[in-house]
Image (cartoon, coloured by chain):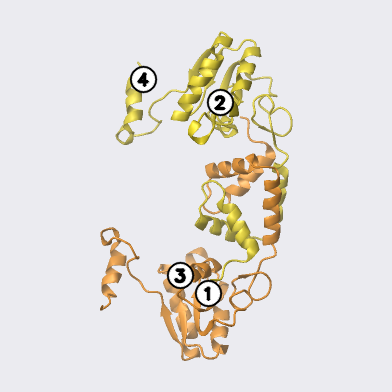
Chain colours: A orange, B yellow
Amino acid sequence: MHGYPFALQRLINEVSKLPGVGPRMAERIAFYMLKKESDYMDNFASILEAVKKITFCPLCFNVSEGGQCSICADDSRDASVLCVVESPEDIITVERTGKFKGYYHVLNGLISPVDGIMPEKLKLGELNARVKKTGGLKEVILAVNHTVEGDATVLYAVSLIKENGSFKITRLAKGLPTGSDIRYADELTLGQAITERKEI
Amino acid sequence: MHGYPFALQRLINEVSKLPGVGPRMAERIAFYMLKKESDYMDNFASILEAVKKITFCPLCFNVSEGGQCSICADDSRDASVLCVVESPEDIITVERTGKFKGYYHVLNGLISPVDGIMPEKLKLGELNARVKKTGGLKEVILAVNHTVEGDATVLYAVSLIKENGSFKITRLAKGLPTGSDIRYADELTLGQAITERKEI
């Protein structure tokens, strides 16, 4: 059987390792790149070069362009609230809501013994150190997923930090998504929404 | 709202242009690349550099590493059959079946006036010139999709080449996919399978 030219096969192999990309889609992406103008590859390569310079903020572990990230460097934010998230992606997701004006702390994952992710691998010690020394901290929001891993991480984080200050610790509300139809909600979500119903 | 560092945003933008990749998936892919070892980017960039050297075969328009492609350069294949396909990807797809030992001709698309793809944009003139000068050609297989675009291309190609030799022109069989359940087949496919039923 005749295959692809070696360089093209390497590109397909490399692309198929990307998350969410299967072998057929990798072929499609590789051919898309191949059919572009020749400066397309140079452009892509220069972007990869620039991305290599991205570091992580030493305070909150968000992505950064060297040193503190743009959020930690912003003095106008509310230092009394700290939002703990799983990953830097989640910071942007929360920022998009426009509902949060405090600072962030990235854990770099959630506790998951099945996947070998134990508390020591996460930035939980750094979180503990940070809440201890942050003056005037009133609230720590644990903005993690409502999953087994999220629950385990919340349990661990609460036991770790709760004695270190007079802040309250909160978690995101559980309930029905906005715009959703209760007929299509799963029982767990609907059950939670009933249990945590609010007076209006 | 705080966004991603500039270099990371550029990577996300570039990745989200790839076929089949939406904005959320582009973020996931960009972060996947970011979390890799630093030589990952260099490796990827060197692959892109190598892919720039890939050209197209001047005879059949398959991908090639300079000059004729590996199939056209292979004298052991059957010169009496020519398989016409939409793209170089399709050559590999046909090769994987192990059912075809002849040569190929890539059209670089299918006729689609809606998308502005007229016959002149495709390698149909080259196909015509090729069948004229190929001695001993017995069959031209038009291995294109069973779609409106495929049908239009077949109609045009047949009218163009049929007077240029004594070869027969064939198209891939329509019918039910192997392993499929007739209960889940669409009516068009099942109808075709009934019309073109075979005596056993």
Badge 2 is on which residue? Answer: B119
Residues at marks 1 and 4 touching, judged by CB atoms closer than 8 Å: no
Residue identifier under label 4: B196
Query: Earlier along the polypeptide chain: callout 4 or callout 2?
Result: 2
Tell me the mark number nearer the camera, choosing from 3 and 1.
3
Question: As displayed, is residue A22 above or below residue B106?
Answer: below
Amino acid type for the residue under numbered disc 1: Pro
Task: Identify the residue under disc 3.
Answer: A97
Q: Residue B62's image quarter?
A: top right
Q: How many marks?
A: 4
- Mark 2 secondary-structure assignment: helix
Q: Nearer the viewer, mark 2 or mark 1?
A: 2
Residue that label 1 marks? A119
Residue pictured at 34% horizontal, 29% vertical: B188
How packed is label 1: few (under 14 Cα within 10 Å), some, or many (20 or more)? some
Q: CA distance from mark 1 to mark 4?
A: 63 Å
Mark 2 vs mark 3, foreground winner is 2
Identified at 32% across, 61% down, the residue is A180
User: Which residue extends farthest top?
Assistant: B166
